[in-house]
Amino acid sequence: MRLDGNLRYVALGDSHTEGVGDGDDDTGLRGWADRLADRLAATGARVEYANLAVRGRLARQVREEQLAAALEMRPDVATVFAGVNDVIRSGYDAEAVVGHLEAMFAELTATGARVATLTFPDIARIAPLTKPLLPRVLDFNERVRAAADRHGVVVADVAAHEVATDRRLWATDRLHCTPLGHDRIAGALASALELPGADGSWADALPLMPERSTLLTLAEEVRWLGTFLGPWMVRRVRGRSSGDGRAAKRPALLPVETA
């Protein structure tokens, strides 16, 4: 991957790639993909960047709605991260979901793009009530690693590092990252892509925090159940998605301004 000329970066995915948790819909979302685009531009390359991600999208929808547009842009770098919305739903089909990801890996790498993806951390340590989903997450990660290996896709193996489950990296909904979390993921991808100046410091542990009491922990879980999990389940029952009526925030390649 050359960094001494023009560089096109396209991000495909769901709310994580869109940047939910880093900013808001009024002031604008940033997120790890925007931050990675900044890191690419910091190498001296003239970067054009598009973000096709839309919150709530399943892996199948990312493939159906975003891949063709991404291929038309002929990216030099592409990130593909989807499947978490599938993992947390009933009726999850691991083979089908990772099959959609692998199809995207295959088509993008066939154009010569440098493609990168992520693994998802131990969900039970982020939201203890989701512990029954942990076997799915671990299996999903293994399948993604294998699919990426078959196509020469770079994996930022976030799940392999302890800091990935530090609650300061996660928003109150337990599903999306805080600005700090998004910045750490951008650092992980920059390191995996071996960008100049990138290193493993993204995985450094944060300062220790005081132990939380059992009562406080229980109260937080009850609050999360009522504030986030409950409404999410209601949307599923009604067949609705958080991304209904939404479009990509950056659907075309635009220059990345450097400081």
Image (tube, grey):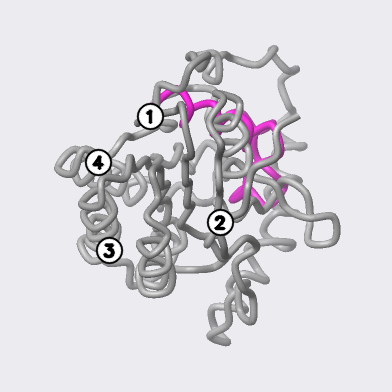
User: Can you tell which of label 1 and label 4 is closer to the viewer?
Assistant: 1
Q: Which of the numbered marks, if any, corresponds to residue 100?
A: 3
Earlier sequence position, callout 2 versus callout 1: 1
Residue 223 magenta: no
Using the image, determine if residue 2 lies above or below residue 140: above
- Earlier-in-chain disc, 3 versus 2: 3
Give the CA separation, mark 2 to mark 1.
18 Å
Residue under label 2? 253
Q: Please report the bounds of the magenta region as a residue range.
A: 165-192
Residue to which mark 4 is pinned: 142
**Amino acid at dot 3:** His
Quadrant of the image occupied by residue 244: bottom right
Of 123 and 181, the residue lying toward us: 181
Lower sequence index among marks 3 and 1: 1
The amino acid beneath tag 4 is Glu
Q: CA distance from mark 4 to mark 3?
A: 15 Å
* Cβ atoms under marks 4 and 3 closer than 8 Å: no
